[in-house]
Image (tube, rainbow, N blue to C red):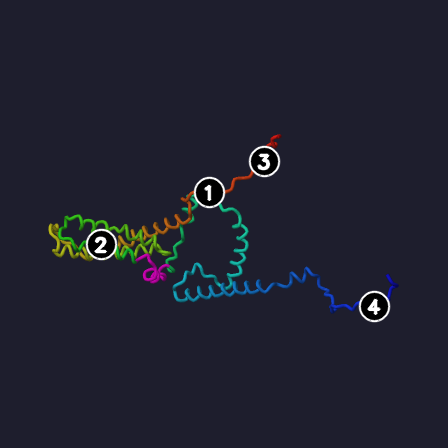
Amino acid sequence: MGPPGLWAAAPWTTIPTATSTIPADARLQSAPTRGETVARAKKTDRAEARRRHRAVLLEQGQGDPETYEAPEERATVRTGRVAGASASSGPTKRVGIFGAMKQAVNPVHYGDDLRYAPTLIFRTKAIWPTVLLSVGGLAFGLTQTDYNSDGYRFAATFVIAPTPLIQPMIAGFLAPRATWLAGIVSALISGACLEVLLIWAYSGHLANMPPGTFSYLSLTLDLALSAVTFGALLGAASGWYKRFLASGALGAQPRNQKRPSSSRPASRRPAPRR
């Protein structure tokens, strides 16, 4: 090799830049990615849209006031959800029968339930099946010609009975809320159909009709009283039974539970000698 300085050094091919005084770890933590920012903005916008939608429905009388969150309560609810997330992340325990029976009992809000009545009657599937059943029983009873026939007895004592049983149970099981009110409404419809059938029967359209008269006013009061009392009780009981079934207390134990692994190492057999 020749003496130093014989050949000139090659020039630098990169442009020198100023060094940053911020540590690399701090720069990575303080600069969020664009994907995280967009996802967080979408999540906030969707939550705010859902809150505005619930507020509009509540003003129109169609929403559920129990699920509405006021603006001053959002921070508290959000904090409670974050705190409960860690508790819910653990293994869930199966609710017992008595615990499920207690959880299935909901407090009754009479004012909110009465305001919910138009939605319950016209926008849910709780009342229409009972209406079809009551009207069908009335139509079947009007086709009978004998008071002692099995068809008339079946219609007047079972389908549209003086003490309603089937209609309140169906309405209470199908109603999303206000099950007691659904039972009363369905029982009143059944009682009205029964009153029409009895008036038609006592007007001389059936053979072998027992002699005697009855008061239309007393019949109406008796049917209305039975509809209010038994309808409310059976509707509320059906709603409670639906919530009890939804709790899963009568379900089977999960089978995907892993058995605890043994700390004892697996023994290996020595390889046979050849």
Q: Quadrant of residue 271?
A: top right
Mark 1, residues whose alpha carbon is within 10 Å: few (<14), some, or many (≥20)? few
Q: Is residue 118 magenta?
A: yes
Label 4 packing within 10 angstroms: few (<14), some (14-19), many (20+): few
* Element under disc 2: helix
In the rendered image, residue 103, in percent from the top left (x then y), is placed at 43, 49
Image vertical order of residue 9 relative to residue 129, above or below: below
Q: Read off the residue under disc 1.
A: 255
Above or below, 228 relative to 22? above
Of marks 4 and 3, which one's residue comes earlier in the chain? 4
Among the two numbered marks 4 and 1 on one chain, the one whose residue lies closer to the N terminus:
4
Kind of element beneath mark 3: loop
Q: Which residue is mark 3?
A: 266
Residue annotated with mark 4: 8
The quadrant in which the N terminus is found is bottom right
Question: Which of the marked residues, 2 or 4, is nearer the chain's N terminus?
Answer: 4
Give the residue type at disc 1: Arg
Nearest to N terminus: mark 3 or mark 2: 2
> In the shown orientation, is residue 1 left or right of residue 111?
right
In depth, the one of 156 and 232 nearer the eye is: 156
Residue 99 point in image, percent of width and height: 43, 45
Label 4: state its secondary structure. Answer: loop
Between residue 23 and residue 168, name the one nearer to us: 23
Q: Amino acid at mark 4?
A: Ala
Circle on res. 137: 2
